[in-house]
Image (tube, helix red, strand yellow):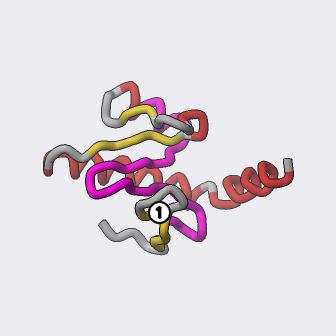
Amino acid sequence: MKLPGVSEAAHRFGGTEFQVDGIEFMHSHGPTWLDIRLSKDDQASVLKSGQALAHRFAPQAGWVSFRIKSSQDLANGRKIIQLAYEYAKKNLEEIKSRRMKTKLE
């Protein structure tokens, strides 16, 4: 899946991190496990519908986990990744501002 303006980097806990304009919106833990950052509304929707799992460490920040068990999961994964990408693109300044505030505290 190719998305405009997305770059890859090593993730601080291992795996690969995907960023748009320097903002991480997803990272992988191997080929079958993804952690994806969504808006709160999108997070609630995909959790309620069972499309993703609650993130183990940072659910409060909009993160969900997605497991790829078979090729049938790929289409659903693409939809969730697209939501995360659109959220990151739309809210770049807000996310950057929040990060700066957190670093200062």
Q: Is residue 9 above or below residue 60?
A: below
Residue 22 picture location, percent across and down: 60, 68
* Closest to the observer, 67 or 3: 67
Q: Quadrant of the N terminus?
A: bottom left
Residue 80 picture location, percent across and down: 37, 47
* Closest to the observer, 17 or 73: 17
Magenta part of the chain: 17-46
**Numbered-mark total:** 1
Residue of label 1: 17
Residue 82 picture location, percent across and down: 39, 55
Disc 1 element: strand
Residue at image x 40%, y 41%? 65
Residue at image x 34%, y 43%? 66
Q: Is residue 65 above or below residue 3?
A: above
Which residue is farthest top? Answer: 48
**Callout 1 crowding tier (Cα within 10 Å): few <14, some 14–19, many ≥20:** many
Residue at image x 67%, y 54%? 95
Which residue is farthest right? Answer: 104
Residue at image x 85%, y 53%? 104
Q: Is residue 40 magenta?
A: yes
Q: Is residue 82 left or right of residue 92?
A: left
